Image (tube, rainbow, N blue to C red):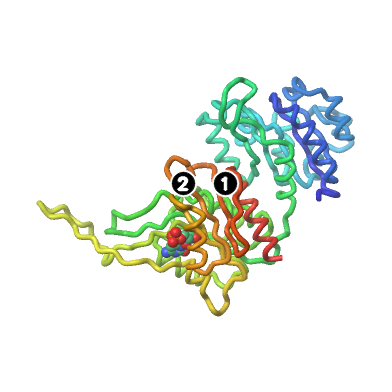
Amino acid sequence: MLASKNILLIIGGGIAAFKALDLIRRLRERGATVTPVLTRAGAEFVTPLSVSALAGHKLFQDLFDLTDEAEMGHIELSRSADLIVVAPATADLMAKMAQGHADDLASTLLLATDTPVLIAPAMNVRMWQHAATQRNIAVLRGDGIGFVGPNEGDMACGEHGPGRMAEPLEIAAAVETALADGLLKGKRVLVTSGPTHEPIDPVRYIANRSSGAQGTALARALAALGAEVVFVTGPADVPPPGGVEVIRVQTAQEMLAAVKAALPVDAAVFAAAVADWRVVGASDSKIKKTKGGLPKIEFAENPDILAHVAQLTQARPALVVGFAAETDDVVENATAKRARKGCDWIVANDVRAETGIMGGPENAVTVIDAQGAETWPRMDKARVAARLAERIAAALA
Ligand code: C5P
């Protein structure tokens, strides 16, 4: 699966470094060549000898190693790789990456390359949740850095929460996905995302809690597989991904127009939380408060964009995927929704407030198609996106 792929593996300094040894094995048994780089702190946790022995490859540790500079050079080292994997990616390494520091071999390699990078963060839960780390994560995601994990669970320091490095098998799967580019080459895919805003007057509107995180992650994952992505987004909380065509809209009616203009496409994924209703006769000027009087708001139903596209008789996309945010009887309701709207798949999720899914970093979905329902474990929205993108690629193949 990874035959003839060159992976540059940077092992940072964290207790999870021991899992990097198993990761090397997992990558090699899939056919990859692993070139290891061990940071100074990483060498406090695993020995250079075990890393190079398992990798079956020379280990690189120092920025100023004149022999290596003459032979290969740090720039060559990172550019000859198909993928750079950082595991464990410590809070410090991530901060360096976000800031563009280059004061040791690992950070210099990461700065001196345009090779795709996948990181497996590992740190204490408070370090992960710290505002500084969260800022760095946003910067790194914006820079197109791929993430796998961290997972939630017990930590070596005795605390519990997000911060555990993803397991070697999960990282190996993420590496395969990251290198599976080209699976969607030549395919045009439409993604709707975010909420819509339905104006009441020029300053007030009706909206919902959708952050656009899942739709954005999906567009990024589809683009990473080589698709030409048209991304129609309402006013979302997260910035759109790079490398896609972005069309910004406010209302459901604008979203429908943008979707129609984007057709034909090979696949269309409707992740947007479209407002079901709009205000009839939204006022052109701000509605004034009047003594004793409350404004009367009349609603009209918005067009169902997903149903419109799913039921096209001409130029219908080969695959139409809807989402279903439900609070009760998730699978049952979503299955009925799939039939009612006429789409091929429905990705259902439970958005009761206590799940923390709407607006949160994780999602737990059930994919419903003609064959039945497939429930996935709860995971990062980026992982859900990667798996969905792969499933879409397989369906279009
Ligand atoms: O009916 P419901 O809003 O639960 O359906 C959700 C699915 O339908 C999502 O895929 C959403 O993007 C899509 N939808 C749409 N246009 C609407 C309402 C929902 O495309 N007006």
Q: CA distance from mark 2 to mark 1?
A: 11 Å
Quadrant of residue 123 within the rendered picture: top right
Residue 324 in sight from this viewpoint: yes
How crowded pointer 1 is (Cα within 10 Å; few <14, some 14-19, many 20+) is rated as many
Q: Which residue is mark 1?
A: 381
The kind of residue on which mark 1 rests is Lys
How crowded pointer 2 is (Cα within 10 Å; few <14, some 14-19, many 20+) is rated as many
Q: Position of residue 86 (x, y in %)?
A: 71, 36
Quadrant of residue 76 within the rendered picture: top right
**Residue 13 vertical placement versus 10 (above, below):** above
Q: Is residue 272 left or right of residue 397?
A: left
Residue at the (49%, 53%) spot, across then down? 330
Residue at the (56%, 79%) spot, across then down? 314
Q: Position of residue 169 (x, y in %)?
A: 74, 40
Residue at the (78%, 39%) spot, across then down? 8
Going from the N terminus, do you reach mark 2 or mark 1 first?
2
Q: Position of residue 226 (x, y in %)?
A: 68, 59
Residue at the (29%, 58%) spot, across then down? 202
Q: Which residue is mark 2?
A: 358
Q: Is residue 389 left or right of residue 46?
A: left
Q: Is residue 88 left or right of residue 259?
A: right
**Extreme-left residue of the structure:** 291
The kind of residue on which mark 2 rests is Met
